[in-house]
Image (cartoon, rainbow, N blue to C red):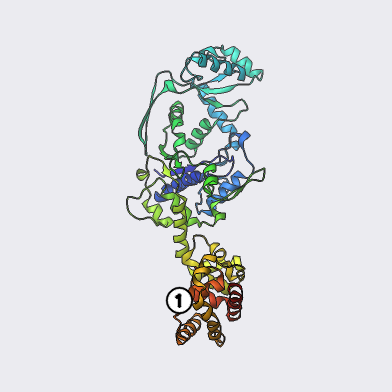
Amino acid sequence: MSVRVRFAPSPTGPLHIGGVRTALYNYLFAKKHGGEFILRIEDTDQSRYVEGAEEYIINSLQWLGMSFDEGPSVGGEHIPYRQSERKEIYQKYAQQLIDSGKAYYAFDTADELAAMRAELEAAKVDNPSYNSVTRMKMKNSFTLSKEEVAAKIEAGEPHVIRLTVPIKEEIRFKDTIRDWVVVHSSTIDDKVLLKADGMPTYHLANIVDDHLMGITHVIRGEEWLPSAPLHILLYRAFGWQHPEFAHLPLLLKPEGNGKLSKRDGLLGDFPVFPMEWKDAEGEVSRGFKEDGYLPEAVLNFLSLLGWNPGTEQEIFSMEELQNAFSLAKINKSGARFDIQKAQWFNQHYIKAMDDADLAEEVNTLVDNKELAANLVTLMKDRVTFIKEIVSEVPYLFDAPQKYDEAIAAKKWNDLAKQAMPIIIELLNPIEDFTTENIHSAIWEGLPEKEIKPGKVMQALRLAVTGVGNGPDLMLMLQMLGKNEVIARIEKAMGSLG
């Protein structure tokens, strides 16, 4: 049996990072087994449709390198891949359930449904619902004659199609992650399958599409676990074999209590979406891409939020992830979202980048290839994000306007004041202003004046950069150039005394 999995998001806004992890696990499972990864857009609820959301989903997957074998933008044997374009297909299968007695017409108005729920709540019914008992008091195919039903449909009276849930039936299935799940049909209500506007609900569309598209494994979030027994009933109603189910654990808040939300990102100052999103009101939500995360880092980070390879290995290439991934090694419990770990992965992948490739990225920020290459040498091992290679060294672009007071109080002492004019004298004759020549001049010249270089280097750094710590000082001096370095030392001597 060829493995076929699907990622089926709804275009109701930006793709949450938890959805990205679901897509990743589907992708890895498909690739490991030589199968197909399908993207399907579940947009049956047109009231929640958001313009641009579908494009956002596709762009996010493409940025992360998760190419799909079938879907809206690539086609496939099962077109169309947008549920809003498959309306006639769902109507056909809903009618099939009507004809087989597995579903029925219901003509209840919103007021009648509200009255029914109010009556059940007043009677202190634990789970007020439209089910095998309450259906007999409502306006549907069970309480109306065939002629009355036909007349109402002919007259265009609004109606829905509901699943006929068996009164006494055990729904039992095995979830790959959670083992056996057993639910009694008495706890399930007669769900609407086809709405009054002719559009299907998620439940019908999901089942029909998974069957017609040959989906072998449904890998989705645990929030869909309560719906799984209903889906099993639908498969039984159609006489179809259901796919294997695997319900993934939740992504939890950083403190580990509750599901990760957009608000958690705002409070914790981190993104919860793969890419930046701007809503209709102009509010911008941060994205991992725009924050500076590399796609490889995001994928590696997400892969370990819920899945454990069973080894100490943490760094995985995409190929290694595909080879190692297994549904059997996914945890049941939720995974705490640790943004510091994501940053750690990003640091690793920046350090692992080829210097020339990294310099090309930095050059887009500085538009100077030589400077970009020097910045990479200077900062590569010190940053979490590529943009910090530039942003963390503002003093390389502009002379300091102020000096770290704590460092000045401690290091701008009499020895430093004595050494600075000498350092200027030592640097002035250097024609080839390289790190080697700068180092030799200072380390050979200062001892001749009975000054140990190590005693005044932090003061020199303060004079040139305004701060007391940072990357390789000799390389920074080379990058700034002799005239700029001397000018800065002279300025510091005047400012600091």
Q: Quadrant of residue 185?
A: top left
- The reply to whether residue 395 is visible in this rendering is yes
**310 vs 411: above or below:** above
SS of the residue under disc 1: helix
Residue 147 lies, in percent from the top left, at 59, 12
Left or right position of 444 against 149: left
Residue 126 lies, in percent from the top left, at 46, 19
Quarter of the C terminus within the rendering: bottom right
- The reply to whether residue 34 is visible in this rendering is no
What kind of residue is marked 1? Answer: Lys
**68 vs 166: above or below:** below
Residue 166 lies, in percent from the top left, at 44, 20
Residue tagged by mark 1? 455
Residue found 39% across the figure and 48% down from its top? 33
Quarter of the N terminus within the rendering: top left
- The image shows a total of numbered marks equal to 1
Q: Residue furthest left?
A: 311
Left or right position of 88 against 381: right
Disc 1: CA contacts within 10 A as few (<14), some (14-19) or many (>=20): few
Between 79 and 37, the residue placed more toward the observer is 37
Residue 70 lies, in percent from the top left, at 52, 46
Between 166 and 227, the residue placed more toward the observer is 227
Residue found 47% across the figure and 46% down from its top? 21
Left or right position of 99 against 334: right
Residue found 62% across the figure and 38% down from its top? 49
